[in-house]
Every structure is written in C-alpha cells, then in structure tokens.
C-alpha cells in the first residue's frame, strides 16, 4: 500500500481518504479487480488523474494500477494491423522503430508535452481522459482505429475509437481499454500541432493526415478545436480525387491550398444567416483559429505527398 | 606544410598576452554562491521543508467571487469537525484590521465585502492539512453577489469599491510648452497584460508561539522588517514580540510573500498555542500574491522632419486591482519614464492608478517602467516607419546622456551611456540563418515537434531601449545596517538583507574578502532581531546593504591595522592585506591577520543611507530618484506568418552596470531578466474574465521553457562608475525585464509589418493575411 507514514504518524493523505491500491499483472485480473470494487478507478500513467486527485476534484475510493500489466505495454502484429497495448507510453511510441510503423502517432507522442509527462502518460490514458487537446486522438480518428475492450469473464469487444470519443458507445462497469487496433498503411502520415509557444504546450489546433494508397484515400482529422476530433469527410474525398496516385502522388499546389480552406471551413463553419439574411462575421479569435486549421491541413497534406 | 602551420600557431600563441589568472575571490571575481551546491543537490532547506513537534496545518478560505457583500459567516460546522483546533475570521483579529504594503487598505479577513477573487475570509488550523482544507470549505459564507468592476476605464464612474475611493493616485505631469507641436505626429493605443511573478516554490511558512505571548514566524520573506511591523500591528503586539526568521527564499522577482498569507499563520499559532504550518498550493499562490499592473496607454509623439522628438503626450492607466499596495510607486515610475531614455523637451503625461475588482497588482520588478517601455518603443518604431528612417538611427538621434533632463525636471547626473549601448547592440553581428545545417535540425517557431514551415517564416530585427530607477523613490528612506565581525581569520557578516537569488550574500563575502583580505567569510541568517535593511528589490541591497557592509569592513580594517601602523610609525593606508597576510608598502612589515588579531574579536557596525529624494509635486516635477540604470536590447525573431507563432532567436544585450562586481552572477541576472521579459512578450498573461482568475496553474499560465528562451548575447557591459553608488555599481536585474518585451515586439513588427500594440503578442497579431 503506497502510503507514506510521516515521523509523527502523519500521512500524506487524509485518514478518511485512505485508498486501497491493487496492482494486477494481467488484463483479466485488472477487470476482475474493477468488477469486485465498482468504486475503484483505474490508473495508468496518472498524468491527468493524479492532477485531479491532488487538486481535490477527485477522491477515488480505490485505485487499480495498470502499470504492471506487461501484456498491454507493447504491441504485436495481426493481419495487416498493429495491436497496440493501451499501456504504451508516449515516450515509447516516440521512438524510431515505432515511428517507422505509424509515423503520425509517433509524431503526436513526441509532441505530447515535456519528457516527464511523455514517460508516464499512456495511449490508453489519452483515450480514456478524452481531453480535447489529447494529441493522439486526431491521429487515431484519422487512422480509424478500433479499441479492444476487455470485460468481465475474459470478454472482448471491439468498438471504433470515434464511437467512444463521441459517446455513442461507453465503457461499461468493469471494462478497460486493452488494445488499440491500428491499420498498417505503409504510406506517409503527418501530425502537425500549433501551440502558443516554442516549448511544449497544449495544442490550440492539431491536424493528422494519413494516406491510404491501397484504397487511394486521404484521411484527415482535426484535433483540439472541438470536444472530439473532427473528420472533414467531404474534403478528404474531394482531395483524394485530385491526387495522381500513379505518378508519385502528385498534386497541384492550388489543390493543397483549397484543401486547407475546405477542411477549415468544414470544421469551423460560418455562422448561419440570420432571419434577414445577414451573416454575422466570426469573432477575430475564431477566424484566426480557422486560418490556423487551414494552414495546418495544407502543410500536413503537402508534407504527406512530398 | 604541416610544420609551418604548427610554427605559426606556436608563434601566435607566444605573442598573445598570457591570460590573466582569474581572481579567486574579492570584487570582480566570479565567486560562486555559498549555497549553490546545497540548492543543486536538493539539500537546501526551504520554508516548505520546516517541521516542528506537534505542528498544526493551516488552510485559508478564499472568496470565489470578485465582488460580493458578505451576508453571514457561519463557522460552526468547521469548528465541530474532528481534528480542527481553531477557526479565525475578521472577528478574531486583535489589532489593526487592515494591512497593505504601500497603503494599509486591505482587511486581514474580509468582513462585509469581498473585493477580489481569492480574498481571504477565514483560516483554519487542524491536525492534518486535508482536514484543514475540508474545514475551510465547511465554513458557510452567504454572499450577495455584486457586479464586479473589471474594466479600469469604468472605475472612474463606478460606485466606490472601497472607503478610500477608486482613484488610488493621479499624476498630471506637465513639463515644457503645451503649445509645442511637431511636423510629424504619430499616435497609438497600447495594452499590457497581467504578469504573475510565479516565484519558484509557492508560499510556505511556519509560525511558532513564544512563551512571552509573542510569535516567531519562519518565512521566505523578502522584506522581513516591513512584514513584522504589519503583522505586529494586526496582532496588537509590540513589534519586538513578533520575530520573523527568514528561511531559504526559493526565488523572488517581486514582493514574493503575500502578507495576507503570513497574517493568518501567526494568528492561528497565537490562538492555538501550537506551531502552525501553511503551505500554499500553486493555485493559492496565484490567487494570493500581487501581479504586474495591466496597463492601458495612449500616446502621441511629435517630432520634427529629422525625427527629433518635440513633444510627448500620454495617458497611462494602471489597473491596481482591489487594493492599493504599491501602485502609487508604480505609477510614479510609469509617468516619470513615460518618454524613455530620450531627450524630450515637452512632455504632458497624465497617469492614473485605479481600483477595480481584479486581483491586486503590486511590485514586480520593473513595474511601471516596463509597461511604458513597450509603448514608447512602439511609438519610436511608428515614427521611424513614418519618416522612412532606420529604427535604430531614429533612436540614436534622440537618446539622452548625462546632463539631460527627465520630464520630471530631474537632471540625469549618473552615467547615461545610452548611445554607446545602442551602438554596441547594433554593431553586434546578426545570428546566421540556419542555411548550412540540415533542415530537420532547424528550430522553427512552434518548437521541434511543431508545425513550422521554413517557407512561411520571416525573420525580424528590432530594438528596445529601457530605463529604470534604483532604490525607493520620492523621499523613501533607504537605509541599511550591517555588522562585520572577525575572529581567528574568519569573518562573519550580519545584515538583514535577504538573499532572494539576487546574490547579496555572495557580494557581501566578496566585499569583506576585498577589504579585510580574509578568505573565509560567512553571512549570517537573517531575522528581525537585526536592524532593518529594507526590501530585496530595485538593486537596494547591492547599493545600501553592500555599502553598509563595506563601511563596517573598513572600520574593522582600521581597528586591525591601527596598532601595527602605530608601532611602525606609518599610516594604515600604507599597509595592505592580501591572502591573510599584512604587508607594508616597503616590505619591512610582514605578518598574518591571525597573528595581528592576537586572539581578539574585532567587530564594527555601519549604516549606509544614500542621498535623499523628494516626492513628485502636483505637476509631476521633482528629484524623485537616487539613480537610473539603462539597457539596450536588439531582438532577432522568427515568425511563422501564417500561424502567428513567434520564436525569439537571439537577444543581444548591452547594459549600463556601473561596475562589474561578480561577472558570472551579473550574467545570470541579465539572462534571467531577459527571459522574464520573453514571457511578458509572448506567453505570460493571467487572464481574469469578469474578475475571476482562470487557469491558476502553470499549465494554463505558460512560463518560458528552455526552448522558449533565446540565445542571450551580452555584447557589452558599460562600466562607467556611478560616483554616488558604493563601488560605482548599478542595479542590473530589473532593466532587462523592462527592455526585452519592447525589443521583441519591435522585432515582430519588423518581421510582419503589423502594429503589435498588445503584450503578450497574440498569434493573430503576428499573422500576415492576404499574401
């Protein structure tokens, strides 16, 4: 039990908040622990959860630590897909071997905060926290990743990541995100993020662009500007038709520009016209955000095709 | 071939003068700080590390509203919680109910009305920190929420927020001919955000009751005597019965300690008879201590066709927040330096500091001077653009020098090498473009994993000239007392000047090493039993406390040498002390300090008090400042003109330092100050929509990281000694803070062609649209 006893019998936690901590070593043990203690909260890297605990917003009755479950800390291959353990840290995903597999996810992991956060924070935690600024989320949305959810009694079910982020499907009692299934596309992918500074910071907007040469498709997702990543499906389809897939994936520069504008307008639409037909201008800060999204989308597609 | 090369190299080496051996100690050496090792290894005890047997933990209940009437306060539930030992409110303040650094207008605990988000209402002592926090939350306060006044421009018409009224100070400075006009007129409106001093280590302290009914507080105070006096008055005790012991100060760029945090601590210790500890969270720290004044400035510069300034008109509005604190002093600095280090024959500056329901503003280094610097330098850029002149050239045509007159009517008598500073940064070679390195290694705006694209990046070069005053102004009594004691070849300095990271203890050791020739010098810890030395800000300690240490050391020197000089029939001036040895000019006498001491203990106490100043009169005129310091900075920035992200590539600094006393320490002070300025320029703004502090944490409030800090080149330190200052040295920490934001804004202007009239610079203000 990770409590620290002070010299005078004082502890670092109030007696009334004494917590039970379980440290299972397999996914099924973790699910069993969660089922046994419905009030328990699972914790992996703790970069979001512990901040909430420290600020007093959350007082979990018990914790189930996921750090010792080795089966979810790596990845394996499965019929053209990578099965990524939910316990993969951002630091691990940022390394070159991982970047060779899923370059956009590696780029997002490298951009996800300062080193001490990347060393602790996990892929599964990024999904479970579902913060709008979660850097992995637009990449997973663009990759159309699916989640393998572990449930009681060894049950496994698979749901698209976008369903969980949009609240279409929820985690049920005792369930845990076990793995993330990501297609291996063997093509360029780009993740770009705009922040307020040169040092690590939260995204004001981010864009992930992945190419799917087998299906001659472009998939794009915009993060940080809405509660969940946005997919400009029309813009994706439109631009995929303009790429000369057989000739080095060539595209005219004007199309890149137009793609940026298309994505930005789709994600940050104009105000609907009022009854008298007049259209109210967007506030300057929103217009700037739209320009930022347009520039990021144009740059991301440009880099993916170059 | 290779032989020839070797020979040439050897010859060159032989010709070059042998490098002078670096000084080991004394003034001019880079003596490292005595506590550097402990701080690096994490063994240095800070206030948050203190512990006493049987201590209780305190927590403070703060107002969630920026403006509300308090209908009732019910502490019954909190008192009844197990483990709670005391709950105090305004009813429990035994002495004066008000405190405040500049003006005592701030209640210890709010009683009838709360005037800002985070104002203390009650405090609790309990046997566990969580119990204390929960008990504080269990105090039931019934509020009648009032509309907050958060726009300083509305403060003039608004109902008085305080019995003292909403206008804290008004200075209508009039200097010269109001009818004067120039051929060229440029105008501008500028806005400066709210910077938080964000000290390393949030506030923490321990209060221990004394058997005589007094209390001892262990605090990281930067002005222990002023804090003691305020505390004693509020506790209704004589000052002698309240003692403040200064523990390690983690770092301070402002009045680090909020007295509103110290007051409940001692009160709870007095009430419970137990030691009480309070450790603020970062959130409480943001809510509690004072911030830099958000400022609104309107300027009109008149110049002749050659670009020489004819007249400056300005209106300056400082948002003081809910309480006056030191806003009157900040306003004096803002108004006095409103024209910058330029010769301006006619100046009409109107300044106001007003009360709002925003968090209180106060002393953060360079206050007042920093805000106006950003504005007058923007005006200089505007004027240069209008005249088609190089911005540096326009500045050179107007810079002041010793003998020129400030708009306050005070003649600048100290060295003012402004032209020399500007030329030094101008002549420094520009940093090369990263053409020769692989593109992946370029550090673009947005950072190493950012979205920067070389094609959209524009480079800009800009200049900033800034000035600040040193020591308190307008008749403030600046005095410091120091005692120097020598026994057995070891010297000890006792002085109540707090080491806040500015390096005073190192400087004190150097001064004594120089004067007494002893190597081992200790600086005693500070408490309020020592005579006062003033607050650790505005270069005060280098000047007054350093001056006092030097005088005391010289008195000890005389005591030591007098008997020897008498014996050998020569004056003490003919004897010198080096490396613990006393020698006469002719070499006849040679003995050691230890021998000369003969087991005696020698000590002396001395005071230093600089020449007096006078308050500004009704027209903003008067000799208000003891001394001035100047700085020139050239900023080179890269701007991604589509995203509006800015990276400061290099800041070249030339500074008027009077004399370099410790080169390493001086460089670190300048680097730190410049970097604080980078924060003001780009990221640091504590936002308070409708008076509520949003994101009081270091994620929401973005301080510069190592990646944001530019390459800082100190290209010139002008050592023109200020004859009235001890050692001729000037304060060095504040003026880079004042100048670097203006220089960065100027460079962004050059890169984008945009006006950039607001700090911090928002990305949308650095975007170039319609390319």
Image: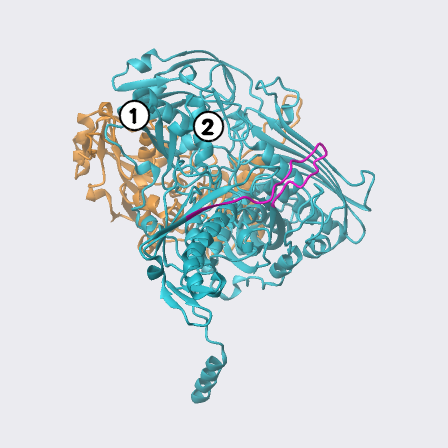
Chain colours: A orange, B cyan
Q: Is residue B152 visible?
A: yes
Q: Which residue is mark 1?
A: B211
Q: Quadrant of residue B279?
A: top left
Q: Residue B99 appears at what percent x and percent y? A: 49, 25
- Residue at 33% x, 11% y is B76
Q: Quadrant of residue B272?
A: top left
Chain of the residue on which disc 1 is drawn: B
Chain of the residue on which disc 2 is drawn: B
Q: Residue B358 appears at what percent x and percent y? A: 54, 27
In the depicted view, which residue is nearer to us: B432 or A138?
Answer: B432
**For this view, does B396 lie left or right of residue A90?**
right
Q: Quadrant of residue A220?
A: top left
Q: Residue A234 appears at what percent x and percent y? A: 50, 39
User: Of callouts 2 and 1, which one flags the residue occurring earlier in the amino acid sequence?
Assistant: 1
In the rendered image, which quarter contains the N terminus of chain B? Answer: bottom left
Q: Which residue is mark 2?
A: B230
- Local crowd size for mark 2, using a 10 Å CA cut-off: few (<14), some (14–19), many (≥20): many
Write down the region rendered in magenta.
B604-626
Numbered disc 1: secondary structure: loop
């Amino acid at each position: 039990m990770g409590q620290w006893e002070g010299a005078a019998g004082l502890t670092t936690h109030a007696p009334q908040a004494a917590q039970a901590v379980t440290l299972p070593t397999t996914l099924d043990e973790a699910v069993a622990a969660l089922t046994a203690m419905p009030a328990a909260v699972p914790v992996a890297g703790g970069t979001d959860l512990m901040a909430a605990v420290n600020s007093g917003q959350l007082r979990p009755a018990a914790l189930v630590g996921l750090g010792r479950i080795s089966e979810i800390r790596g990845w394996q291959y499965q019929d053209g897909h990578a099965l990524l353990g939910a316990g993969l840290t951002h630091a691990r995903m940022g390394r070159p071997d991982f970047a060779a597999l899923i370059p956009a996810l590696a780029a997002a992991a490298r951009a996800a905060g300062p080193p001490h956060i990347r060393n602790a924070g996990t892929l599964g935690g990024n999904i479970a926290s579902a913060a709008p600024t979660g850097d992995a989320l637009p990449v997973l949305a663009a990759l159309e990743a699916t989640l393998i959810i572990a449930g009681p009694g060894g049950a496994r079910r698979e749901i698209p990541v976008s369903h969980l982020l949009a609240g279409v499907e929820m985690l049920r009692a005792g369930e845990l995100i076990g793995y993330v299934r990501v297609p291996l596309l063997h093509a360029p992918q780009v993740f770009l993020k705009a922040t307020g500074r040169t040092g690590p910071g939260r995204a004001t907007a981010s864009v992930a662009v992945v190419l799917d040469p087998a299906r001659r498709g472009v998939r794009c997702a915009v993060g940080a500007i809405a509660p969940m990543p946005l997919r400009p499906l029309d813009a994706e389809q439109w631009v995929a038709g303009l790429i000369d897939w057989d000739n080095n994936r060539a595209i005219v520069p004007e199309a890149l520009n137009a793609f940026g504008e298309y994505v930005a307008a789709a994600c940050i639409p104009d105000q609907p016209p009022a009854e008298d037909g007049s259209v109210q201008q967007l506030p300057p800060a929103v217009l700037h955000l739209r320009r930022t999204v347009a520039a990021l989308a144009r740059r991301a597609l440009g880099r993916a095709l170059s | 071939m290779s032989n020839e090369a070797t020979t040439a190299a050897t010859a060159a080496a032989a010709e070059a003068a042998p490098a002078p051996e670096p000084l080991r100690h004394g003034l001019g050496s880079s003596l490292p700080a005595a506590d550097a090792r402990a701080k690096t290894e994490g063994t240095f005890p800070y206030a948050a590390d203190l512990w006493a047997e049987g201590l209780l933990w305190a927590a403070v209940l703060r107002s969630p509203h920026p403006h509300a009437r308090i209908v009732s306060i019910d502490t019954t539930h909190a008192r009844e919680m197990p483990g709670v030992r005391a709950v105090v409110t305004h009813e429990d303040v035994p002495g004066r109910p008000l405190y405040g650094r500049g003006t005592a207008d701030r209640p210890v605990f709010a009683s009838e009305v709360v005037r800002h988000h985070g104002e203390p209402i009650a405090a609790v002592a309990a046997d566990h920190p969580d119990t204390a926090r929960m008990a504080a939350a269990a105090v039931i306060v019934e509020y009648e929420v009032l509309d907050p006044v958060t726009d300083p421009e509305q403060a003039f018409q608004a109902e008085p927020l305080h019995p003292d009224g909403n206008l804290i100070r008004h200075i209508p400075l009039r200097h010269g001919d109001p009818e004067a006009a120039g051929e060229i007129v440029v105008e501008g409106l500028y806005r400066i955000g709210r910077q938080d001093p964000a000290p390393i280590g949030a506030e923490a302290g321990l209060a221990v009751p004394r058997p005589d009914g007094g209390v001892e507080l262990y605090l990281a105070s930067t002005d222990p005597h002023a804090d003691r006096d305020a505390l004693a008055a509020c506790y209704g005790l004589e000052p002698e019965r309240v003692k403040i012991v200064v523990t390690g100060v983690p770092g301070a760029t402002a009045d680090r300690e909020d007295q509103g945090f110290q007051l409940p601590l001692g009160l709870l210790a007095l009430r419970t008879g137990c030691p009480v500890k309070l450790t603020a969270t970062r959130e409480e720290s943001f809510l509690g201590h004072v911030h830099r004044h958000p400022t609104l400035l309107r300027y009109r510069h008149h110049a002749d066709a050659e670009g020489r300034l004819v007249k400056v008109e300005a209106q300056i509005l400082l948002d003081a927040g809910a309480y006056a604190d030191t806003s009157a002093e900040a306003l004096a600095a803002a108004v006095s330096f409103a024209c910058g280090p330029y010769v301006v024959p006619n100046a009409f500056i109107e300044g106001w500091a007003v009360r709002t329901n925003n968090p209180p503003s106060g002393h953060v280094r360079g206050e007042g001077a920093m805000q106006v610097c950003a504005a007058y330098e923007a005006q200089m850029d505007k004027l240069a653009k209008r005249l088609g002149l190089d911005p540096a050239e326009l500045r050179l045509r107007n810079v002041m020098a010793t003998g020129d007159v400030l708009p306050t009517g005070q003649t600048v008598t100290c060295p003012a090498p402004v032209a020399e500073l500007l030329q030094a940064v101008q002549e420094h070679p520009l940093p090369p473009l990263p053409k020769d390195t692989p593109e992946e290694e370029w550090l673009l705006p947005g950072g190493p994993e950012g979205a920067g694209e070389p094609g959209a990046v524009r480079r800009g070069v800009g200049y900033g000239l800034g000035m600040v005053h040193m020591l308190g102004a307008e008749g403030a009594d600046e005095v410091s007392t120091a005692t120097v004691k020598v026994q057995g070849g070891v010297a000890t300095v006792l002085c109540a000047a707090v080491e806040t990271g500015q390096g005073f203890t190192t400087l004190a050791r150097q001064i004594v090493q120089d004067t007494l020739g002893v190597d081992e010098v200790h600086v005693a810890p500070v408490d309020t039993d020592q005579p006062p030395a003033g607050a650790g800000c505005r270069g005060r300690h280098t000047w007054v406390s350093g001056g006092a240490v030097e005088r005391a050391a010289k008195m000890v020197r005389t005591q030591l040498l007098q008997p020897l000089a008498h014996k050998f029939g020569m004056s003490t001036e003919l004897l010198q002390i080096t490396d613990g040895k006393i020698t006469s000019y002719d070499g006849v006498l040679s003995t050691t300090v230890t021998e000369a001491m003969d087991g005696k203990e020698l000590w002396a106490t001395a005071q230093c008090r600089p020449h007096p100043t006078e308050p500004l009169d009704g027209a903003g005129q008067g000799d208000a400042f003891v001394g001035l310091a100047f700085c020139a900075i050239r900023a080179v920035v890269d701007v991604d003109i589509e995203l509006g992200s800015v990276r400061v590539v290099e800041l070249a600094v030339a500074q008027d330092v009077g004399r370099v006393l410790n080169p390493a320490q001086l460089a670190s002070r300048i680097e730190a100050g410049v970097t604080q300025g980078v924060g003001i320029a780009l990221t640091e703004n504590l936002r308070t929509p409708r008076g509520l502090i949003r994101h009081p944490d270091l994620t929401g409030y973005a301080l510069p990281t190592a990646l944001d800090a530019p390459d800082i080149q100190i290209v010139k330190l002008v050592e023109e000694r200020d004859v009235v200052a001890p050692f001729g040295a000037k304060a060095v920490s504040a003026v880079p803070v004042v100048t670097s934001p203006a220089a960065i804004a100027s460079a962004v202007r050059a890169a984008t062609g945009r006006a950039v009239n607001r700090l911090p610079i928002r990305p949308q203000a650095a975007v170039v649209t319609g390319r």
